[in-house]
Image (cartoon, grey):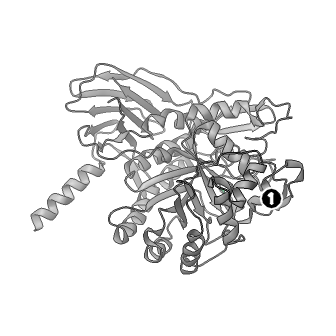
Amino acid sequence: MLQKTMKKLFLAILLMGSISLTAQPGTSKITIHADQGKTVINKEIYGQFAEHLGKCIYGGIWVGENSPIPNIKGYRTDVFNALKELQVPVLRWPGGCFADEYHWMDGIGPREKRPKMVNNNWGGVVEDNSFGTNEFLNLCEMLGCEPYLSGNVGSGTVEELAKWVEYITSDGDSPMAKLRRQNGREKPWKLKYLGVGNESWGCGGNMTPDYYSDLFRRYSTYCREYDGNQLFKIASGASDYDYKWTETLMKNVGDRMKGLSLHYYTVKGWDGSKGSATKFDKADYLWTMGKCLEIENVVKKHITIMDKYDPQRKVGLLVDEWGTWWDQEPGSHPGFLYQQNSLRDAFVAALTLNIFNKYTERVKMANIAQIVNVLQAMILTDGPKMVLTPTYHVFNMYKVHMGATYLPLDIQCDSLSTGDRKFASVSASASKNAKGQIHITLANINPDKEQKIILDLANVKISKVSGTILTAKTIDSYNTFDQPNVVAPAAFKEAKVSKNGLTVTIPAKAIVSLELL
Ligand code: AHR
């Protein structure tokens, strides 16, 4: 019996991959178990989030057809093209906190007739509802991504949410389908992902988990599946370390929900200064790495609770808000959460995505906050100007993992530490796509020392390797509208084919992606 348990434990460790902090300083070994891939990396892990917040929608994505800024049917062309390149798999909208005050019927029909509202969560600005359901779903269609709607439970009615689903997905002679047709859209859209509330423990209604569980059961009952559309209903989940919320939802709701969300920000705290996005020292950098990597333990603990109630892993964990949260840029609107994005943010993206890949069996989706001009954005805009952030480049380098089979790996490397946190100086992920190509993403977190990494792939025959590197002079380097390529990807030539795999030398503070042929 004991032997069996030990064997199971050993197998589990092998399949999950492990990290040991034992190597010579500056030298690491990564063993990739290319023959043990079992689980496909959900492409939705590379998802995005767009909220009616600051200049995310207005100015960032949507400028309207009559804007002097070049646009395709009102969507700014430069941003649209950059997002198309990323192959965004899923886009969450309209919030965030905004979602629980949003009344979708205000955002349909002729734009000049749409009622206005106050965006109470984000700066008290007037929202004119010119970007609504049709504009969002058409954008998703043009990008080729799945829409993920966040429904209003905090201040909306069951009827309102039920009718939203009918408006979007019903093909019949139903009242909402007729309304959609009047608004110029004949055929329904497909809607898979439906969030039932957002942060229901906070801005979404300040509820207790028991009360919210009942509301989830009630609201979701009336969200029907019309004409072959299948909904993946997502319950509003915990923040960070709130394991009680997860436990209660799993107990009360079980597999009535297809997904349970989790929000985890790399943030110093919710009161007072969160620190500057661009002015920081090495200690701040290491703290950020430690806090970001802590998401692995948090995810593991939520998964352990979910496993207790749902051992077959029917319910997905969806980290539908994550990323860095710094002080807003000096001079920007206090409620707009506009922040710069440095090489440090690129590391947060790289490390977090490596972790999500590893837990892909339970982590079915993740949505970085947010896509344009808000928090850890892919893209920043200023009037007609646009710049790609270091985080954008990470997503572009990592997109090869989407839909590929996760390959377990073990890392032996030296460690870094900050306060009570000690962590591996190297982070990695590997996958094999349908064509049999292996992709490896690696990050050398050490801000000062290069890493020589021996990659052991045992029986994999490698004839060629090509790579891309993302680094910069300093860890606080960032791109501006005038200097957009301070942190930009470049060809990486320091990977050499060796007897059992590869030898790779990665400079300090660099992120690398490799393709093996
Ligand atoms: O992403 C910004 C805000 O952070 C979201 O609106 C909310 O859900 C979270 O607190």
Q: Is the residue 142 above or below the residue 236 in the image?
A: above
Q: Is the residue 414 above or below the residue 163 in the image?
A: above
* x and y percentages locating residue 260 in the rendered image: 49, 64
Q: Residue at x 57, y 64 (%)?
A: 224
Quadrant containing the C terminus is top left
Secondary element at tag 1: helix
Q: Is residue 61 left or right of residue 325?
A: right
Identity of the amino acid at label 1? Asp
Q: Is residue 207 left or right of residue 237?
A: right
Seen as rendered, the residue at the extreme right is: 112
Asked if the beta carbon under badge 1 is closer than 8 A to the nearest atom of ligand 1, the reply is: no
Where is mark 1, residue-wise?
Answer: 106
Q: Nearer the viewer, residue 139 or 290?
A: 139
Q: Nearer the viewer, residue 54 or 511?
A: 54
Q: On the rendering, which quadrant does ligand 1 occupy?
A: bottom right
Q: Nearer the viewer, residue 339 or 258?
A: 258
Residue 270 makes an appearance in the image: yes
Residue 115, by quadrant, is bottom right
Q: Is the residue 106 above or below the residue 340 in the image?
A: below
Q: Residue at x 57, y 69 (%)?
A: 220
Q: Nearer the viewer, residue 258 or 320?
A: 258
